[in-house]
C-alpha cells in the first residue's frame, strides 16, 4: 500500500459533504487499489483521536469521537417575538387577572385561537387558576412567578400604572388610563362603561409591549 493512496483516500473522506460508499471512493482512486484495506487502516489510525472514521450503513465518514461529543454540544437560544395577539393577551391577563377567555376576548374586541394561550403556557408565563362561579364554569387565567422573574417584577403590585407608562412614553394621552393599574377584571356594575374603558385597548397593548421578546 502506497502512502500516497492512503493520503488521497483520507483527503477524499475529509472533504466529502456526506458519507461515501466504497464504490464512490474507488471511482476516485487508481484502479486496483485495495480501498477497503486502506479504510480499515485509516480507521485504526484515528481510533484514539478526537475524530474517528466510522462506517454506518455501508458508508464511511469522519465524525467526532463519541467520548467527546457531549463536550462539544452547544445550546443556542433562539429569540422570537411574540405575536400581537399573544402580547395583548398577556397584558390583559397581567392587569385583569384572574380573567376568563371570554373576558379576554371582550376586552380585545376579537376572538383568538387556542394557540395564543398555548404559547404563553409553554413560556410558563400564564397558567389556569380555578373556574369562575358563573354558568359554564369557565377557566380563569393568571400570570406566574416565572412571568414576574422574566420581566424583573417582584409582585403584581409592581406592574407599571398608567402614569408610569405615560412617563416612559409607552402610551399617550389618547389612551384611557383606566385600562392599567388594576389586577381585577372590570366589575359588573361598571360594564356599562366598558366600551369607553377598552376602546383603545388594542393600540395600548401593542404600544406598551411591542418591544418585548422571548428568549
Image: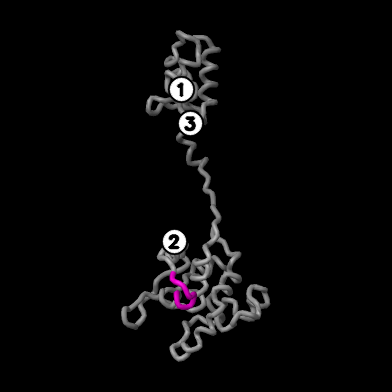
Q: Is residue 201 magenta?
A: no
Rendering colour mode: one colour
Q: Who is closer to the viewer here, 117 or 12? A: 117
The quarter of the displayed image where residue 98 is located: bottom left
Residue 53 coordinates in the image, percent (x, y): 46, 26
| Mark 3 surroundings within 10 Å by alpha-carbon count, few (fewer than 14), some (14 through 19), many (20 or more) | some
Residue 110 among those drawn in magenta: yes
Q: Under tag 1, what secondary structure? A: helix
Name which of mark 3 and mark 1 comes first in the sequence. 1
Q: Which residues are magenta?
A: 105-111
Depth check, mark 3 against mark 1: the one in front is 3
- Mark found first going from the N terminus, 2 or 3: 3
Residue holding disc 1: 43
- Helix, strand or loop at label 3? It is strand
| Picture layout, residue 110 above or below residue 121 | below
Marks 2 and 1, the one that precedes in the sequence: 1
| Quadrant into which the C terminus falls | bottom right
- Residue assigned mark 3: 63
Q: Residue furthest left?
A: 136
Q: CA distance from mark 3 to mark 1?
A: 11 Å
CA distance for labels 2 and 3? 35 Å
Q: Residue at x 50, y 10 (%)?
A: 30
Label 2 sits on residue: 122
Amino acid at each position: 500500500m502506497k502512502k500516497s493512496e492512503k493520503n488521497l483516500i483520507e483527503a477524499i473522506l475529509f472533504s466529502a459533504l456526506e458519507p461515501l460508499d466504497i464504490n464512490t471512493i474507488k471511482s476516485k482512486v487508481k484502479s486496483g487499489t485495495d480501498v477497503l484495506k486502506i479504510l480499515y487502516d485509516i480507521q485504526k489510525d484515528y481510533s484514539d483521536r478526537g475524530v474517528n472514521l466510522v462506517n454506518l450503513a455501508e458508508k464511511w465518514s469522519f465524525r467526532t469521537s463519541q467520548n467527546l461529543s457531549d463536550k462539544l454540544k452547544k445550546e443556542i437560544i433562539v429569540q422570537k417575538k411574540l405575536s400581537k395577539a399573544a402580547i395583548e393577551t398577556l397584558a390583559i391577563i397581567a392587569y385583569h387577572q384572574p380573567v376568563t377567555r371570554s373576558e379576554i376576548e371582550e376586552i380585545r374586541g376579537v376572538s383568538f385561537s387556542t394557540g395564543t394561550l398555548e404559547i404563553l403556557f409553554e413560556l410558563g408565563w400564564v397558567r389556569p387558576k380555578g373556574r369562575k362561579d358563573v354558568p359554564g364554569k369557565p377557566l380563569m387565567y393568571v400570570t406566574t412567578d416565572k412571568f414576574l422573574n422574566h420581566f424583573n417584577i417582584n409582585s403584581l403590585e409592581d406592574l407599571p400604572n398608567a402614569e408610569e407608562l405615560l412617563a416612559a412614553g409607552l402610551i399617550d394621552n389618547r389612551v384611557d388610563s383606566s385600562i392599567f393599574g388594576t389586577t381585577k377584571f372590570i366589575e359588573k356594575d361598571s360594564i356599562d362603561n366598558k366600551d369607553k374603558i377598552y376602546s383603545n385597548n388594542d393600540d395600548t397593548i401593542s404600544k406598551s409591549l411591542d418591544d418585548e421578546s422571548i428568549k
